[in-house]
Image (tube, rainbow, N blue to C red):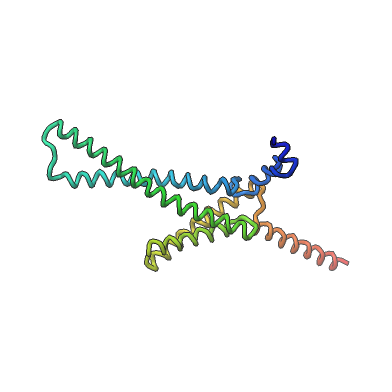
Amino acid sequence: MTREQLQAEGRYPSQAEIHEIYRTSRLSIPTYARLPLSAALSFSVGLCLGATQGSKMAGLRFRAEHTHKLPQTTTGWYHYHKSKNYHMAFGGLREGIRMGAKVSFWTTAMSGIEAMFDSYRGTSDFLNTVTSCVTVAGAFSLWNRYSLPMAARTTKTALVVGLIYGGLQDLTAMAKGRPIGYVDYLKRQFNRASGEGGDNTTKSAV
């Protein structure tokens, strides 16, 4: 069956429905696409950071292990640096994959919890982002068995990150015309207060 036939039967969203899905989604990216994208991007960042740190540590470790038996010839130095580069590359790749997997897991968990709160509350705003960041920070602290002061510091950092990240998302959403729950609520309260103020003024004039 063609896409037009599926749309006629209601089994495939129309262009208007697809446009509305993107318009009402965080960062204009639907959840089913945003979660894999955040996982891939966070893995890439973790891979780069881990590879840089891992290769550096592997090079220092190799240098320390071979300090007592440094080569004396040109050929020996050639093989020394060749082996060192191999260890650095292997150490960087191993640490990069390890770091990438960790960063990707926690970032995807945050995005997933954020999407869950969006669905539960029926609105997407910074409150859901802050809640998801703090939740993941608590789980991260428990997993790593942080002390109470360290866990509190981690949660405080997550709170600040959630406020900034969620606030930027809300600003972007408002610029694109996506409804924000607390903004709509404040508008309704303001309009109600303005209406009541106008009615009282009219009654006083009468």
Name the residue furthest left.
72
Where does the C terminus fall, quadrant-wise? bottom right
For the image shown, how many numbered marks are present on the structure? 0
- In the image, residue 79 sits, relative to residue 109, either above or below, namely above
5 with respect to 141 (left or right): right
Judge by depth and name the residue closer to the eye, 44 or 189: 44
Apparent side of residue 137 relative to residue 186 in the rendered image (left or right)? left
What residue lies at 49% left-to-right and 52% top-to-bottom?
A: 108
Q: Residue at x 13, y 37 (%)?
A: 71
Q: Position of residue 204 (x, y in %)?
A: 84, 68
Residue 1 placed where, x, y %?
69, 36
Q: Position of residue 118 (x, y in %)?
A: 60, 56
- Residue that extends furthest to the top in the rendered view of this protein: 74
Left or right: residue 76 compared with residue 99: left
- The residue sitting at 67% across, 43% down in the picture is 18
In percent of the image, x 12 and y 45: which residue is there? 68
Task: Tell me which corner region of the image, top left, top right, bottom left or bottom right, holds residue 141.
Answer: bottom left
